[in-house]
């Protein structure tokens, strides 16, 4: 692949980031969202897969870099099912669950207090929504409930019904709501994000170069964590890479250093990174 058209903007920034990793691969940390970034978006989240050629490049990076972390909104076990690489770290449910590359579990115990409430919302949603007719897919992540409506024929009407029947009642009982591409998530009202998990993992090692690849609003918190981390020390280099489609939210476009076409542009960027670190 010659990569033509895959890097939309930020060729120079990508080259600078790749060079920073090449100088000291073991001091390099790569953070990677899964859905929409290394796995093309599909109607039903259960059908999504990471293409084998992407897995191969990431496996090479796990062997050469100081850290490769998969940072997903999915439950941690579900993220590992999608891309299972020994030696990688995993962040699940937007930062509530963290598994270090050495196997250490850094899961936030406070989230456990909200499991009953989240499950009551999940039960009510399953009972009150005609998911088939609405084009809704419920993804129960135990500490969180994701409500996908990408398959809805009338997205505005479905969104309205979801707000009325699930989102507002969940908010009224004190749970927090986050949104994404055709997605609501009911979650514990705790200040944990992909950004807090990224900070935790970065603080656990002596890294000099870091890259965060993502496509959605929750990834912008990871971009921000990386940028703040690099501002603390002039030797550090950070690169936020956005996997772009026609649906990419504005903050993701604005906060990224490099824009690539989702998802082959991510493979192109990661392949350049692997080649530069000796893969
Ligand atoms: Mg994503």
Image (cartoon, grey):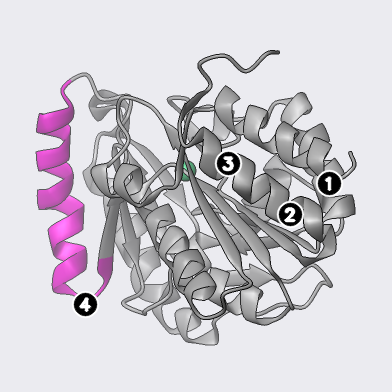
* Mark earlier in primary sequence (3, 1): 3
Instruction: Label 3, secondary structure: give it.
Output: helix
**Numbered mark located on residue 262 in the image:** none
Residue 276's x, y, as percent? 80, 41
| Mark sitting on residue 277 | 1
Mark before the other along the chain sequence, 4 or 2? 2
Mark 3–mark 4 distance (CA, rounded to whole Å): 42 Å
> Where, by quadrant of the figure, is residue 264 drawn?
top right
* Range covered by the magenta-colored residues: 154-176
Residue 150, placed above or below residue 59: above
Provide the residue designation for mark 4: 174
User: Which residue is denoted by mark 2 in the rendering?
Assistant: 21
Which of the image's four quarters has the C terminus? Answer: top right
Q: Which residue is mark 3?
A: 14
Earlier-in-chain disc, 3 versus 4: 3
Q: Which residue shows up at 46% across the image and 66% down it?
A: 227
The residue lying toward the viewer, choosing from 187 and 192, is 192
Disc on the earlier residue, 1 or 4: 4
Cα distance, mark 3 to mark 2?
11 Å
Looking at the image, which is closer to me, 149 or 208? 208
């Amino acid at each position: 692949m010659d990569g033509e058209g895959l890097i939309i903007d930020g060729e120079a920034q990508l080259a600078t980031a790749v060079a920073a990793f090449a100088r000291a691969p073991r001091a390099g940390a790569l953070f990677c969202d899964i859905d929409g970034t290394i796995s093309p978006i599909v109607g039903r989240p259960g059908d999504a897969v990471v293409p084998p050629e992407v897995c191969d490049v990431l496996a090479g990076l796990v062997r050469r870099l100081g850290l490769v972390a998969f940072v997903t909104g999915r439950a941690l076990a579900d993220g590992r099912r999608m891309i299972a690489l020994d030696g990688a770290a995993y962040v699940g449910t937007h930062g509530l669950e963290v598994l270090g590359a050495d196997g250490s579990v850094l899961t936030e115990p406070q989230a456990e207090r909200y499991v009953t409430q989240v499950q009551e919302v999940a039960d009510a949603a399953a009972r009150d929504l005609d998911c088939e007719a609405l084009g809704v897919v419920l993804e129960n992540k135990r500490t969180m409930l994701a409500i996908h409506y990408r398959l809805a024929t009338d997205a505005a009407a479905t969104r309205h019904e979801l707000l009325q029947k699930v989102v507002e009642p969940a908010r009224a009982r004190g749970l927090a709501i986050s949104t994404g591409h055709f997605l609501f998530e009911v979650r514990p009202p705790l200040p944990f994000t992909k950004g807090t998990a990224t900070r935790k993992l970065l603080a656990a090692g002596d890294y000099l170069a870091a890259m965060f690849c993502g496509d959605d609003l929750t990834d912008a918190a990871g971009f921000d964590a990386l940028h703040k981390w690099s501002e603390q020390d002039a030797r550090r280099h950070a690169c936020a890479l956005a996997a772009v489609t026609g649906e990419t939210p504005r903050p993701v476009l604005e906060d990224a250093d490099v824009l690539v076409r989702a998802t082959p542009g991510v493979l192109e960027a990661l392949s350049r990174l692997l080649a530069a670190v000796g893969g």
